[in-house]
Image (cartoon, rainbow, N blue to C red):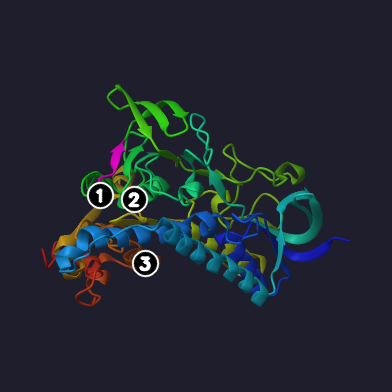
């Protein structure tokens, strides 16, 4: 007889495991089903984020930044270092240890909260008052039943027909994090978050990096002024060679290199050879094979599960969250939706405000934002004021030696309510949290301008930008 559960969660990424834990905390008998395996072929919880995404990429970003500081920045502090070398085996081992710690930690959290964990690919086989879910793990098949289901199957790298990934010469984000040696010439297809972060890692470690982007604009989702500054810094001091408006015509992997032919934005044909080529053109929802057609679950034309504002699907007692549904493909968005889905099942009132989800690109300088961009406000015809403060005028930023970029605040010109905050600069990923809290509580620019910020700190830039909305910035 099939095991019976109150809640079944498909997927153990940030959204799935969080949903399962919260459901168990609320008193539901809960199971989390996931089919991820690590490089050793063993089950590994945490999904893309913990295994080959957020966590390992940030570990390598930190390692590469440390190397760059030693080689290029320590001298100005009076610290001299000679014979500095990169030990890739040790660097990758550190990354893997961090990943193992967190993925193993989820297993402990499941045990602590009494969440059952089943390994395999979960798919619907029947619906009704109770949903029957089949779990396939190789030749083994099990079946469980659950009254409520939360779909948290995440996303997969978007394939590029011209450059099929072979994990040797042509890489996706996972294999790009496992290179045992530093490629002399690295090509990256896609100038989005993944492409820029991976390009940054290997550029700092010594690769000659070229990034090819099909879109004519650089980072079109980012505030235009921030994107312009990022393009200047990345192509200048960081020395990432970024080309936009590119059309690929040929990708030919060989034994020692990948030959890429493309047409640039001026219509001229260009050729380049790379030791490795990373394909990073975005991600697609991982919803095939979940048995949607067997129970009448609605997917849109792009494969996303259709949901309402509470993440309910068209099926009773079935929810979908994270990368499998509309909205930004961000781990923290997935986690909060997972909590909200579990609480909704429990009859509580829970909601995730998609208008105040923070975005971060972990380059150097970092980029972070929340709310509307200036181009969005113009398109919507909303009246607004702008306050801005450069990090070069920040005492803490100068002490850090990280003065590129600025803080920018957008506020409604009539109500003064904060509409958006955009940052390019040091620790932008941490600084953006203040803006998220402010916007969630409906704060005005004046509210932030009246709050005392410690000196000297990077957060003073937020204070100065808020003052700037009313043209009374003090330190520029």
Q: Are marks 1 and 3 in contact (CB under 8 Å)?
A: no
- Give neighbour class at mark 1: few <14, some 14-19, many 20+ (Cα, 10 Å): some
Residue at x 52%, y 30% (from the top left corner) = 161
Q: Are marks 2 and 3 in contact (CB under 8 Å)?
A: no
Q: Which residue is mark 1?
A: 238
Q: Is residue 242 magenta?
A: yes
Q: CA distance from mark 1 to mark 3?
A: 26 Å
Could you tell me residue 296's position as x and y percent?
73, 44
Q: Which residue is mark 2?
A: 200
Residue at x 70%, y 47% (from the top left corner) = 290
Task: Please provide the residue range marked out in magenta.
Answer: 239-243
Does residue 199 appear to the left or right of 470 in the view shown? right
Q: CA distance from mark 2 to mark 3?
A: 24 Å
Residue at x 13%, y 65% (from the top left corner) = 472
Front residue of 452 and 379: 452
Say which quarter of the image contains residue 386.
Answer: bottom left
């Amino acid at each position: 007889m099939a095991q019976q559960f109150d809640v079944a969660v498909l997927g153990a990424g940030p959204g799935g495991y969080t949903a399962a834990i919260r459901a168990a905390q609320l008193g539901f008998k809960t199971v989390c089903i996931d089919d991820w395996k690590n490089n050793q072929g063993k089950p590994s919880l945490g999904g893309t984020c913990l295994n080959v995404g957020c966590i390992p990429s940030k570990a390598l970003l930190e390692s590469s930044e440390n190397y760059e500081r030693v080689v290029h920045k320590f001298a100005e502090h009076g610290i001299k270092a000679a014979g500095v070398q990169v030990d890739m085996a040790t660097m990758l081992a550190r990354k893997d240890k961090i990943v193992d710690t967190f993925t193993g930690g989820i297993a402990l959290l499941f045990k602590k909260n009494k969440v059952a964990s089943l390994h395999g690919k979960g798919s619907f086989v029947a619906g009704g008052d109770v949903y029957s879910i089949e779990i396939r793990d190789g030749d083994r098949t099990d079946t469980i039943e659950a009254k409520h289901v939360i779909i948290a199957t995440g996303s997969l790298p978007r394939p590029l027909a011209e450059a099929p990934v072979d994990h040797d010469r042509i890489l996706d984000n996972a294999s790009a994090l496992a290179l045992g040696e530093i490629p002399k010439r690295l090509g990256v297809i896609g100038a989005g978050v993944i492409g820029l972060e991976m390009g940054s890692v290997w550029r700092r470690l010594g690769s000659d990096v070229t990034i090819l982007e099909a879109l004519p604009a650089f980072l079109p989702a980012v505030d235009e002024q921030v994107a312009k500054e990022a393009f200047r810094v990345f192509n200048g001091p960081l020395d990432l060679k970024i080309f936009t408006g590119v059309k690929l015509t040929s990708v030919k992997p060989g034994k020692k290199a990948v030959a890429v032919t493309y047409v640039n934005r001026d219509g001229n044909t260009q050729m380049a050879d790379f030791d490795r080529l990373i394909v990073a053109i975005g991600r697609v929802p991982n919803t095939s094979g979940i048995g949607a057609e067997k129970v009448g679950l609605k997917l849109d034309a792009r494969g996303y599960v259709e949901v309402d504002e509470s993440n309910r699907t068209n099926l009773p007692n079935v929810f979908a969250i994270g990368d499998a549904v509309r909205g930004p493909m961000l781990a923290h968005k997935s986690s909060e939706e997972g909590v909200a889905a579990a609480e909704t099942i429990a009859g509580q009132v829970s909601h995730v405000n998609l208008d105040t989800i923070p975005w971060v690109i972990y380059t150097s300088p970092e980029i972070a934002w929340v709310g509307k961009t200036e181009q969005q406000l113009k398109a919507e015809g909303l009246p607004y004021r702008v306050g801005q403060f450069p990090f070069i005028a920040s005492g803490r930023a100068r002490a850090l030696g990280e003065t590129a970029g600025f803080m920018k605040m957008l506020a409604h010109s009539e109500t003064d309510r904060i509409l958006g905050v955009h940052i390019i600069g040091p620790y932008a990923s941490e600084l953006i949290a203040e803006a998220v809290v402010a916007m969630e509580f409906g704060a005005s620019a004046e509210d932030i301008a009246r709050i005392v910020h410690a000196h000297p700190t990077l957060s003073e830039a937020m204070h100065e930008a808020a003052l700037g909305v009313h043209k009374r910035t003090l330190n520029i």
